[in-house]
Image: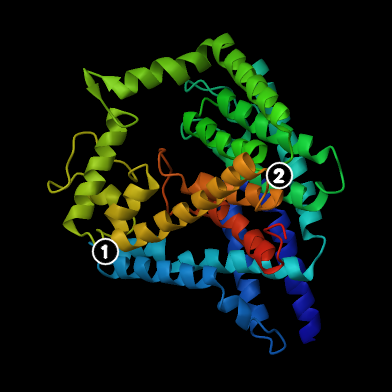
Amino acid sequence: MISKNRNILLSLITLLVILIPPALVTGPFLPDLFISIIGISYIFLNFEKNLNLKKIYQNKFVIFFLSFYFFIIISTIFSYEPLISIESSLFYFRFLFFSLAIYFVLHKDNNLIKYLIISFSITFTIIYFDSFLQFSLGKNLTGYPIDDHGGINSFFGSNADGILGSYIVRTSPIFCSLIAYKYIDNFDYSKYIILFILILASIISLFSQERTAFALSIIPLFAFVFCTKEFRVSQKILLLILFTLVIALVVFLNKDIFLRFFTSINDQIFSNNKIFIFSELHQAHYISALKMFLSDPFTGIGPKMFRFYCDNELFYVQNACSTHPHNTYIQLLGETGILSFLFIFGLFLIVMFMILKQYIYILFKNKSVYKTHYILIISSLLISLWPLAPTGNFFNNWINVIYYFPVGFILFFITNNETKFN
């Protein structure tokens, strides 16, 4: 009976992990439900005596996560309103079990990556087709029109928050990493499929008029072309020229995209004879959040508190109020304090160092340190950790599913010595 229950739980976790890519398209409810079920199923598996998971819980990622979680909880305890803050922080640990469950199932089911590739392929194909249909005809398959914002948003509805580009850009390097891991050594054309996916992600982010998503789409593309040995130097130069020409054609041949990416950026950064960080509104958010940090530098004012205290006289800045400060690092400083900020910023520095190390080795030694699939998967982390960009709410459930989705694969690659060349 125990063995039967174990197999049922493993199958359930596998199925739900495979369904994560399309579930993210539906909104926050299904992916959050799925990872909760995945986490609970994984916890039940841990109760079995024959499972030796000691090594997992000695993993550096687990120690890192629990330490970070500890500081979030401390910040919640000392929050201006703990009962509100606890809504965001108390069950944050479910993302740990989500990542560990993926890592665990990868060791038990050799077909998980293959089925995930199929899941991503179907999801991306439908979204790409739907996006180009909406861009061409003004409506997508479900009848969503291009709204006043101007950009397409496919199945994501209103484009006020720009979800389409964020979804495609953040998940495409995960998708491509799995393709590289499974096929790049045995199928010559797999690198061109990966290149095609990454370039389309950039184009879709242009069509959606999401400036941040487009800027972030350059990260995995650069990592794949210039931080691996999949292409010769002449090919890299040619790809750079062709990509620049394609993007220039899209921007300059579409008036709305041109206005969004050039005119509006100029108007927002340079306004009233002043220079602002991204825009006057963004800068107001940042100043207000930094005032919160300065008032309580070690614990901040508490998770989820920015929206309730941005109009407080201690932190007031004209037009500063919003649900969050629109930058991960500034939000962590203002709401959870310096220690949680240092955890995430330190992780960014580690990932950035790995990418730069790979680039330098290839440039000067013509040698790869890390394997292609590993470079792609950590580039997805770099997108999530990039500090110089407006971001969503750090505690948002939907975005956290994307944050932690690649972690299980990274743990799997590390423990199976699939990160570096010998």
Assign the C terminus to one quadrant of the image: bottom right
**Looking at the picture, how far across and down is residue 300, in whole percent?**
26, 59
Quadrant position of residue 233: top right
- Residue 102 in view: no
Amino acid type at mark 1: Thr
Pick the residue in front: 113 or 32. 113
5 w.r.t. 186: above or below: below
Crowdedness near tag 2: few (<14), some (14–19) or many (≥20) residues, C-alpha within 10 Å: many
217 w.r.t. 36: above or below: above
Quadrant position of residue 127: top right
**Looking at the picture, how far across and down is residue 140, in whole percent?**
66, 26
- Label 1 sits on a secondary structure element that is loop
Pick the residue in front: 376 or 302. 376
Pick the residue in front: 337 or 41. 337
Tell me the tag on residue 9. Answer: none
Question: Who comes first in sequence, dot 2 or dot 1?
Answer: 2
Q: Which residue is mark 2?
A: 176
Work out how far the residue at label 2 is from the one at label 1, CA to CA, in angstroms. Answer: 38 Å
- Asked if residue 332 lies left or right of residue 297, the reply is right
Which residue does the image show at 73% across and 35% down from the upper left?
231
